[in-house]
């Protein structure tokens, strides 16, 4: 009898140990610990034993076995329950880390970065920032800049006209400004000299897009009007700007050129540390006719002006091969900067 009890206990403990789910434990509980279970069956047989001693010993063995089985069932049940809980929690877990990851931050467009830096450099050199409208009159964009109607130089600015006739004006005299130079005119008409301004802004030309041309691009204009201003002041300012913006290893030079609104006129180039030159823009001494158009006496006031392309400066600064890439909105391009 004792042997049967021990065998039943060992079998029960082995099964309990091997159980992998709580459901199995429920089934094993019925099989071994229930009223109709195997141990209960053995207990019923105790009455058939011959001696009191045998009954006592077998009774004690059955009780021990039942206690051991109950304890093993409890232990295994709670172990499996906590394992099931862990699995459930894992399965239902939400990955909240994505909410804590820093958001991907964009950045200003390359032209905006260049624009802001140019303003900073010129403000550092003592200039203030001026603005003018993108839709301009023919008078501000051309005529006051010493390009009367029919002037051949007008053809160099492939002009976009706006279908708008101002009160008292003529059809075909409203344009999208082709350069930032009309801000010179607006500033001289609005302010008394001395004038030291820069005017960054968007300009428009009927240019076909290519690696160095866009129909919509950006310029920064500079204008200084004071007494006894000479070409040396222009050259010195451009050089100070070149070194402040590009770095001390860069030089600048002026090359004779022609613009109707400056006399003499010069293109200005900068030299990279490797010795190569790049053209940045136009400049010159403000033409007396321009001063007169703005009611300034050329015998009393003189000045210089310059204007260069911001897009091309950004292109140079970042080694971009093609201006069109800066406007294509391709994230793979944008994310490089
Ligand atoms: C002018 O527009 C003159 N107003 C500059 C000036 C101002 C001269 C004051 C004298 C005194 P120009 O057309 O060369 O000049 O244009 C100046 C610069 O704008 C060029 O050197 C170039 O850097 C840039 N640029 C011209 N056309 C385009 C274009 N289609 N796309 C991008 N950049 C351009």
Image (cartoon, grey):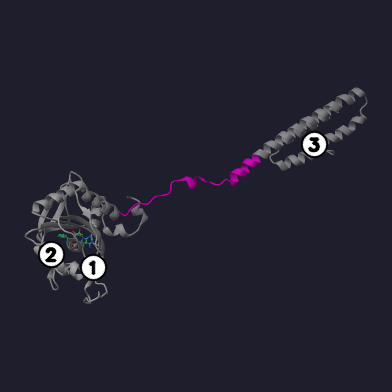
Q: Residue at x 29, y 55 (%)?
A: 112
Q: Residue at x 59, y 46 (%)?
A: 91
- Residue 183 versus residue 238: which sits nearer the camera? 183
In front of the other: label 2 or label 1? 2
Beta carbon of the mark 3 residue lies under 8 A of ligand 1: no
Element class at badge 2 = loop
Magenta region includes residue 90: yes
- Residue 299 versus residue 306: which sits nearer the camera? 299
Residue linked to disc 2: 295
Element class at badge 1 = strand
Residue linked to disc 1: 136
The residues colored magenta run 83-109
- Residue 299 versus residue 16: which sits nearer the camera? 299
Q: Residue furthest front?
A: 192
- Residue 286 versus residue 55: which sits nearer the camera? 286
Q: Earlier in the sequence, mark 3 or mark 1?
A: 3
**Residue 250 horizontal/vertical position (percent):** 17, 46
């Amino acid at each position: 009898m004792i042997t049967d009890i021990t065998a039943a206990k060992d079998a029960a403990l082995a099964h309990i140990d091997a159980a992998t789910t709580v459901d199995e434990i429920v089934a094993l509980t019925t099989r071994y610990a229930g009223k109709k279970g195997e141990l209960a069956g053995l207990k019923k047989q105790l009455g058939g034993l011959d001696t009191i001693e045998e009954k006592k010993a077998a009774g004690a063995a059955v009780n021990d076995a039942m206690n051991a089985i109950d304890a093993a069932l409890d232990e295994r049940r709670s172990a499996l329950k906590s394992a099931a809980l862990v699995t459930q929690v894992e399965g239902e877990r939400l990955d909240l880390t994505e909410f804590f990851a820093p958001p991907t931050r964009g950045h200003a467009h390359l032209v905006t970065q260049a624009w802001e830096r140019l303003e900073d450099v010129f403000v550092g050199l003592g200039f203030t920032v001026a603005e003018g409208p993108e839709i301009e009159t023919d008078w501000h964009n051309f005529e006051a800049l010493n390009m009367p109607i029919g002037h051949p130089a007008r053809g160099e600015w492939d002009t976009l006209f706006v279908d708008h006739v101002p009160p008292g004006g003529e059809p075909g005299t409203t344009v999208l400004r082709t350069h930032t130079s009309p801000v010179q005119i607006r500033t001289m008409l609005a302010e008394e000299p001395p004038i030291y301004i820069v005017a960054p802004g968007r300009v428009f030309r009927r240019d076909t897009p290519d690696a160095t041309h866009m129909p919509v691009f950006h310029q920064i204009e500079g204008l200084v009007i004071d007494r006894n201003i000479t070409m040396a002041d222009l050259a010195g300012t451009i050089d100070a700007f070149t070194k402040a913006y590009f770095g001390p290893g860069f030089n600048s030079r002026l090359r004779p050129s022609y613009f109707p609104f400056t006399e003499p006129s010069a293109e200005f180039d900068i030299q990279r540390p490797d010795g190569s030159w790049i053209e940045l823009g136009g400049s010159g001494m403000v033409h007396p006719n321009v001063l007169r158009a703005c009611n300034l006496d050329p015998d009393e006031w003189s000045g210089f002006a310059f204007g260069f392309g911001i897009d091309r400066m950004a292109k140079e600064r970042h080694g971009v091969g093609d201006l069109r890439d800066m406007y294509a909105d391709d994230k793979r391009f944008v994310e490089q900067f």
